[in-house]
């Protein structure tokens, strides 16, 4: 019952996000429309932003499982496809995403996206022949650098209203990763 209550709160939240921005949605709006009391909401979530984060994480896992045999490991197997799927997920919920995204919760989006992008980039780095020779702290640095480039592209895309032509920047990013990652790792070995 608990999980279904959380899911009901999440579904109600998404319905409200279709109509208005997150700063115009209150806990009272959610519980009234969902048919539960405030105490029930606070039993499951600290605030609306925690509900938003939980909703995003569950929805992307469901989305990815619908398009493939998703598991934590399969997310990274086809790393380019995984990045494309992340963009497709966000775009398929464009109105909700844009209504939920604001300067107050940018950190929530960063944390959410980092959970999915970091293992993808780390896996891509592991495919490089020189990866095993790079000191661990340098490999972590390279992973963070390439992850943050991807993250900033996504956040910029959100801030500009998620235009379709942004796919070109995504393609450019993937080309950059393929074209520069081996060289970057080799330079850390030579230092």
Image: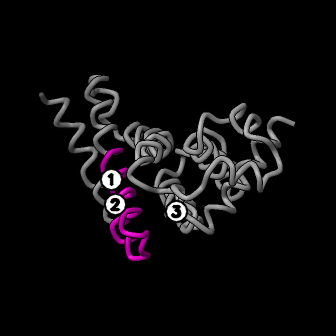
Colouring rule applied to residues: one colour
For residue 51, which quarter of the picture?
A: top right
Instruction: Report which residue position mark 3 lands on.
Output: 99
Q: Residue furthest left?
A: 191
Q: Residue at x 41, y 38 (%)?
A: 122
Q: Are marks 1 and 2 in contact (CB under 8 Å)?
A: yes
Q: Earlier in the sequence, mark 1 or mark 3?
A: 3
Q: In the depicted view, which residue is nearer to us: 113 or 48?
A: 48
Q: Residue at x 58, y 40 (%)?
A: 50
Instruction: Report which residue position mark 2 lands on.
Output: 156
Q: Is residue 140 above or below residue 71?
A: above
Query: Which stretch appears magenta?
Result: 147-171
Spatial distance from mark 1 to mark 3, Cα to Cα?
A: 19 Å
Q: In the depicted view, which residue is nearer to us: 43 or 122?
A: 43
| Residue 55: % across, % down | 64, 48
Q: Residue at x 82, y 35 (%)?
A: 2
SS category of the residue bearing label 1: helix
Instruction: Report which residue position mark 1 lands on.
Output: 152
Q: Residue at x 33, y 53 (%)?
A: 152
Spatial distance from mark 1 to mark 2, Cα to Cα?
A: 6 Å
Res 123 visible: no
């Amino acid at each position: 019952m608990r999980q279904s209550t959380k899911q009901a709160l999440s579904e109600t939240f998404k319905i409200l996000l279709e109509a208005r921005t997150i700063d115009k949605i209150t806990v009272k709006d959610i519980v009234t429309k969902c048919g539960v009391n405030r105490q029930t909401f606070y039993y499951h979530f600290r605030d609306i932003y925690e509900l938003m984060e939980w909703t995003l994480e569950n929805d992307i896992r469901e989305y990815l499982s619908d398009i493939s045999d998703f598991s934590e490991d399969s997310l990274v197997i086809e790393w380019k496809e995984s990045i494309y799927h992340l963009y497709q997920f966000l775009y398929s919920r464009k109105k909700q995403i844009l209504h939920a995204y604001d300067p107050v919760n940018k950190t929530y989006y960063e944390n959410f996206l980092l959970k999915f992008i970091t293992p993808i980039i780390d896996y891509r780095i592991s495919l490089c022949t020189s990866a095993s020779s790079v000191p661990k702290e340098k490999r972590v640095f390279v992973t963070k650098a390439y992850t943050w480039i991807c993250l900033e592209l996504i956040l910029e895309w959100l801030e500009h209203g998620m235009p379709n032509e942004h796919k070109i920047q995504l393609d450019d990013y993937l080309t950059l990763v393929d074209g520069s990652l081996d060289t970057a790792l080799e330079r850390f070995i030579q230092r």
